[in-house]
């Protein structure tokens, strides 16, 4: 099926959608009051009651500020809070999130007008990004995922807002995070903290979020679940962040694909296809940092120049109710343009299984062994694919070893025939160089063969 046959499924341009949507509301206007304001008191003791209430409010603010500062210091120890490093670039004043003239050149489809098998053929197997409408119909999250409701339900639960230098999660209570979003001074941060919590579905205080949405049918296959929850890598995240927060340029792990369902706000995406060289999209530039706002400031303008050395990015402005599909292997960077709330999952399906298997076998051999055992029972067709991939690797390894041996033999023969015209000293030097090259090649071949045997051995043991 070609894209022209699904013309009715394609949506209007993003410019039309923008005209139909309301102007962005300010972040502060969308947020509930985290710390209640004083109310008037009448009668005897009114002054003392007001004073006590103000004292308690002040203590709450001070405690909240200490928690916010501690989270900042832990999540980005390279930045000094007291010296103003979090705001040193002045991105909050640079209008980086102005959206009126941003590009949007991605295809959009409506899931109600496109069969699932058409999506698989046109986008999943072809590894083409697409924005999908109406996948979130019937979700309770549409009504429950807003600052006021989240504060009411999860005020004292701690969500992950970063990681410290040792890789441990840095967490803030929801009420403190919302207080951070309400603070005008903190909202001058170049790249503010944001919630990106991959354990929300496993923790008692936040697992209720799982009941607010359902995995769309288009992405329900999720083959990695067959490996078991204990072995599979993190695969789902609750995401919430203000303007200028986001995810720096990266490729998702293990060649998995991803879907990102946005409930509130707007996200700016830039995507580069598989095979794009890292040195092009992450060049070494003065002032370039890992945050999305830094990439869009320093690198994105280069992508629009005539001398840009590689493929130009796909540009996307994702709005509320839209779901972004990112195929495995695509570089992507995401910048929040205003307060956003979303959920995102990584997954493996039949369409992307061969690539996911190769990466998983190499990066997580124990998990791949368990996975293969279950695949043989529940998906023998995919177990056959694994056998074919292993056979192909064995054939390539044997061909490589044969070529290496032939090359070494040819090199030895050539050096022997030329020895008569070389001095004794030159012969010794050449022999040493050839010996080192042969030894290095043998070590490389041996290492590759050992890795392949190890991976196969662990699978057979299961």
Image: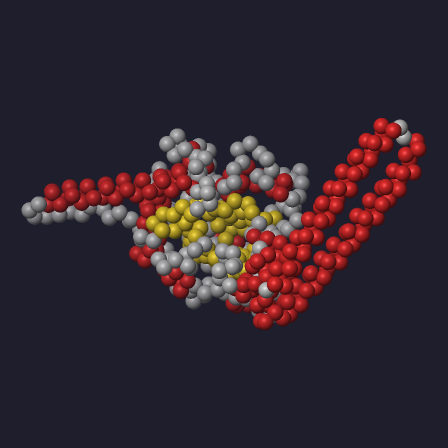
Residue 406 can be seen, yes or no: yes
- The structure's colour scheme is secondary structure
| Total count of labels | 0
Image position, residue 304 (x, y; %): 61, 41
| Residue at image location 64% in from the left, 70% down from the top | 381
| Residue 8 image offset from top left, x and y in percent | 58, 65
At 82% from the left edge and 35% from the top edge, which residue is drawn? 431
The image quadrant where one finds the C terminus is: bottom right
Residue 440 horizontal/vertical position (percent): 73, 42
Q: Residue at x 41, y 56 (%)?
A: 200
Work out whether residue 279 or residue 143 is closer to the camera in this orientation and state it: 279
Check the image and report above or below for 143 versus 242.
Answer: below
Q: Position of residue 255 (x, y in %)?
A: 60, 55
Residue 15: tell me if it is visible.
no
Q: For residue 421, which quarter of the picture?
A: top right
Query: Seen in the image, is 133 located left or right of residue 376?
Result: left
Q: In this picture, is 76 found above or below 252?
A: above
Q: Quadrant of the N terminus?
A: bottom right
User: At 27% across and 40% down in the image, what residue appears?
Assistant: 62
* 153 to the left or right of 455: left
């Amino acid at each position: 099926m070609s894209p022209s046959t699904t013309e009715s499924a394609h949506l209007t341009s993003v410019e039309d959608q923008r005209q139909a949507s309301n102007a962005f509301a300010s972040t502060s206007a969308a947020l509930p009051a985290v710390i209640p304001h004083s109310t008037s008191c009448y009668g005897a003791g009114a002054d003392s009651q007001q004073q006590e209430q103000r004292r308690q409010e002040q203590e709450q603010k001070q405690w909240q500020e200490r928690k916010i500062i501690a989270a900042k210091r832990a999540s980005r120890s390279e930045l000094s809070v007291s010296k103003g490093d979090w705001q040193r670039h002045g991105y909050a004043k640079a209008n980086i999130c102005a959206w009126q003239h941003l590009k949007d050149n991605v295809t959009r489809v409506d899931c109600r007008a496109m069969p699932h098998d058409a999506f698989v053929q046109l986008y999943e197997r072809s590894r083409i990004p697409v924005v999908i409408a109406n996948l979130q119909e019937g979700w309770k999250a549409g009504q429950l995922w807003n600052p006021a409701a989240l504060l009411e339900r999860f005020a004292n639960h701690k969500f992950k807002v970063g990681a410290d230098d040792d890789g441990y999660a840095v967490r803030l209570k929801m009420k403190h995070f919302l207080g951070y979003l309400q603070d005008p001074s903190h909202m001058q941060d170049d790249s503010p903290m944001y919630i990106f919590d991959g354990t929300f579905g496993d923790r008692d205080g936040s697992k209720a979020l799982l009941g607010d949405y359902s995995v769309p049918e288009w992405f329900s296959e999720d083959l990695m679940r067959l490996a078991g929850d204990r072995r599979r890598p993190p695969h789902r995240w609750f995401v919430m962040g203000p303007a200028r927060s986001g995810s720096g340029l990266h490729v998702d792990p293990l060649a998995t694909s991803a879907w990102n369902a946005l409930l509130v706000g707007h996200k700016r995406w830039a995507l580069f296809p598989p095979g794009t060289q890292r040195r092009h999209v992450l060049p070494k530039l003065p002032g370039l940092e890992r945050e999305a706002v830094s990439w869009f400031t320093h690198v994105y303008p280069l992508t629009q120049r005539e001398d840009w050395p590689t493929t130009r990015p796909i540009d996307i402005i994702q709005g509320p109710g839209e779901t972004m599909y990112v195929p495995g292997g695509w570089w992507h960077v995401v910048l929040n343009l205003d307060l956003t709330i979303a959920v995102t999952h990584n997954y493996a399906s039949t369409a992307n299984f061969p690539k996911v298997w190769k990466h998983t076998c190499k990066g997580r051999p124990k998990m791949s062994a368990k996975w293969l055992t279950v695949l043989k029972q529940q998906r023998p067709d995919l177990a056959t694919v694994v056998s074919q991939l292993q056979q192909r690797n064995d054939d390539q390894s044997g061909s490589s070893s044969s070529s290496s041996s032939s090359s070494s033999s040819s090199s030895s023969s050539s050096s022997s025939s030329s020895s008569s015209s070389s001095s004794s000293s030159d012969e010794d030097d050449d022999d040493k160089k050839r010996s080192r090259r042969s030894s290095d090649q043998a070590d490389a071949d041996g290492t590759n063969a050992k890795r392949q045997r190890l991976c196969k051995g662990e699978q057979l043991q299961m």
